[in-house]
Image (cartoon, rainbow, N blue to C red):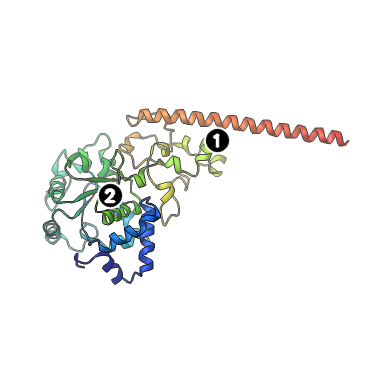
Amino acid sequence: MSNDKTLGEILRKQGISRRGFLKFCAATASMMALPPSMVPAIAAALEKARRPSVIWLSFQECTGCTESLTRSHSPTVEGLIFDAISLDYHHTLQAASGTAAEAAREAAMEENYGKYILVVDGSIPTANPGYSTIAGISNKDMLMDTAMGAAAIISVGTCAAFGGIPHAKPNPTGAVAVSDLIKDKPIINVPGCPPIPVVITGVLAHFLTFGAIPELDALGRPVAFYGKSIHDRCYRRPFYDKGLFAETFDDEGAKKGWCLYKLGCKGPTTYNACATTKWNEGTSFPIESGHPCLGCSEPDFWDGGGFYKAISTPTGDIGRTATYAIGAGAAAGIALGAMNRAKHSRAEKAHEKVTIDDLDKEK
């Protein structure tokens, strides 16, 4: 498909009606946390946007990020966006292999110099170039060469964004994140192990619409998706505030959907859209399925360890200040819960006394 066509032309050719296109724009605005008044502007921008070239590099990774993105349901924002980009190089999805595959990457770099989007998943080994090579080229050399002509870089998954599991101690391969090596390009981190599909497509939608990267937090993550903690938007939060916690995976608290904090949930220190966007067509997310959040969208999450221990007891070098603060919050939640239960108990006893007194009077 030619890159000369606009996104509007491509969507019309695919049979997308004007009504469907506007619904897509409304969904895009909502996904990017923009007001409804922005829908016309998004529609106008996307109508004229050119189909961008995307080069996707995979390094020390498990292919989980690609698997996540290809599991998107259709027709949705994900389908429309990925139909509207020119994915010119991707180890897993491309038809070409060997010399032809590398020729496709080099051609895309030359023809779209300064305009293509570089997507990277997987960490980059630096201890020894031989730990991971592609076509005889070390991961580091391929990254540096391809990044040179990129308009922007999207680090997909925690491995590319923060080093991920390969970076965990003792880090034998010397794994590092993209941002540890590239300092002169705009980088958008989309962490998660793997990330939610609509998060990466939301970033692409923003870039297509405005020709710029979205607002980022201090760790380079899009604020629209990583601006609030999972804890703040978790449906189990009311139980946390009442001091009601599951103690084991099969106790009464777990069966009643109480907070999983004491089972090691990292929701209070993890920023992601899992609790609102969810997975599998918005069906569920780990906490809703009964498992504590692992904190996979945060730096050094694997070294934090203690998946089944409350984060009020620090288990490594990760986030000690935050864990103590959350520990204090949990203590306050437990205390508040105890007060509420005591108050409820007193009210019940008072109600029982009134009822007994009334019966005595009736006698």
User: How many residues crowd around disc 2 within 10 Å: few (fewer than 14), some, or many (20 or more)?
Assistant: some
Q: Viewed as shown, does residue 172 lie left or right of 314?
A: left
Residue type at mark 2: give it: Cys
Q: Is residue 142 above or below residue 259?
A: below
Where is residue 107, by image quadrant? bottom left
- What residue appears at the point 87 percent right and 37 percent down from the top-left corner? 362
- Number of marks present in the image shown: 2
Residue under pointer 1: 242
The quadrant holding residue 50 is bottom left
Where is residue 119 shown, x and y percent of the image?
A: 23, 51
Up the image or down, 190 lies above or below 339; here it is below
Would residue 74 be seen by someone viewing this image from the given angle? Answer: no
Which quadrant holds the N terminus?
A: bottom left
* In the displayed structure image, the side of residue 237 where residue 222 appears, left or right: left
From the top left corner, tell me how far across and down residue 153 is, in percent: 22, 49
Which disc number belongs to residue 62?
Answer: 2
Which residue shows up at 73% across the image and 34% down it? 351
> How far is disc 1 from disc 2 in space, using C-alphas?
40 Å
N-term-proximal mark, 1 vs 2: 2
> In the image, what residue type sits under mark 1?
Lys
Q: Secondary structure at mark 2?
A: loop
